[in-house]
Amino acid sequence: MLRSLSGRFLVLTVAFVMLAEVLIFVPAITQFRLDYLSDRLERAQIASLALLGANDMFDRDLEKELLQNAGVLNVVLRRDASRQLVLSSNLKAPVMATVDLRDVNRIAATRDALRRFVVPGPEIIRVIADPARGGGDLIEAAIDTEDLHREMIRYGLSLLALSLVILVITSLALFLAVRRLMVRPIDDLVTQMKRYAAAPEDARRVIEPRSGIRELREAETTLRDLETQLTASLRQKERLAQLGGAVARISHDLRNILTTATLLADRMERVDDPTVKRVAPKIVKSLTRAVNLTEGTLAFGRAEEAPPALQRVELAPLLDEVIEGERLAYEGGEVAIRHDVPPGTVIRLDPEQMHRVLGNLIRNARQAIQTTHAPGEIVVAAEETAELWRLRVSDTGPGLPPRAQENLFQAFQGNVRKGGTGLGLAIAAELVRGHGGTLAMEETGPEGTTFRIDLPKGMAN
């Protein structure tokens, strides 16, 4: 039970109520002692006045009876400076302390009350107070506090019984209230989470916020948003898995077609036409790259991307090949593509995979510029530090919209143009991660967009 929220709350409730009862008990028992002594003095004053009114016509038996009824051992009543009446009896023990009710010290009174409550046995004290209703100047009395101890025990037990009743009622009421207002809604929330976890792809199991408690309603709203996103993500992954199977089958057949096309392109190199001789090698390279791409797609369909075959590659020729291929892929000269990489710059990478990465980035930049129907420029730059190689692909396009920036490297979500799928950047980011590097958008805006590729040197020979 102590492991549950309601059980721990019950224990805390009992502890705090008991503490409150202790804080109430101590002042109460102190006041009870003071009231007891005041009552004895009032009785003693009445007895003294009765004897005073008898004009000294009384015997010892009457005096003893009056003192016994008053609950005191002796009384001194001072009515003026020249006259006082003294009633007395034999004291069984010496006076142990004096209590002045005219000026009560609450701390000392509390200490004396607790000591008298704990320590049994007879004890005689001297009590001083002002007489009630102007019955004199001063009244003193000796009182045996043995009866006071018994009365304090009886009063304490009755107060304890009342405290126990209050404790039980309060604890039970708070326990039931917490169970209803807090624990039960939390249990319902946990039950709903378990129900959703059993079939997270079922949108009908997404929680609907209903709690009237603000904090719990915020928790339910947050959980609803999380479950909605998770359900959508699971559905998307399921569609991607189905698409992957279809793409794998298409790539298998496409690989065979491209292999045949490559053989035919090899024969074109034997033609004497100068244009054919210039273009045929590029066609062969493009077809070879397409075959490799289909092989990679088949691996991707098995949730695997081929690890990069890292080697030291001169960057400028690789960029020349990528840029020339992109120029041949579209008509029109309104987009200028160039690189600022000096000859002799060598980077350790997989040339085929980096060809795909740079090709995707340049193609996206070119398509973005073409949407503006205005001239533009794409520049590829490189720099080298002690820790890494850094490539930048910059364009003068219109920049990326906010929605595209939020899902930039997520397949089917980061597309920035109509008809796009967003696969290009997702694949490029995965290939760069395979190199141990990162692909990130450095900046974007009306002046253009820049993507940055960081390749570490940690594995370099």
Image (tube, helix red, strand yellow):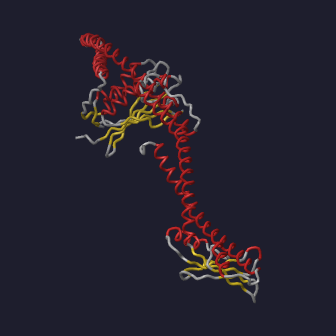
- Could you say which quadrant of the image residue 297 lies in? top left
Q: Quadrant of residue 58?
A: bottom right
Q: Is residue 103 left or right of residue 322?
A: right
Pick the front one: 48 or 314: 48
- The quadrant of the image that shows the C terminus is top left
In the image, is 148 to the left or to the right of 381? right
Q: Is residue 395 above or below residue 383?
A: above
Q: Nearer the viewer, residue 101 or 265?
A: 101
Residue 354 vs 6, above or below: the answer is above
Looking at the image, which is closer to me, 136 or 327?
Answer: 136
Indicate the position of residue 385 as horizontal and vertical percent values.
Answer: 34, 45
Q: Considering the image in quadrants, where does the N terminus appear?
A: top left
> Which residue: 68% across, 72% down?
43
Using residue 68 as the reference point, say whether residue 271 is left or right of it: left
**Which residue corresponds to the image point at 51% horizontal and 22% vertical from the top-left?**
371
Going by the picture, which residue comes out furthest to the bottom?
82
Q: Is residue 191 visible?
A: yes
Horizontal and vertical percent position of residue 45: 71, 76
Residue 450 locus on image (x, y percent): 45, 34
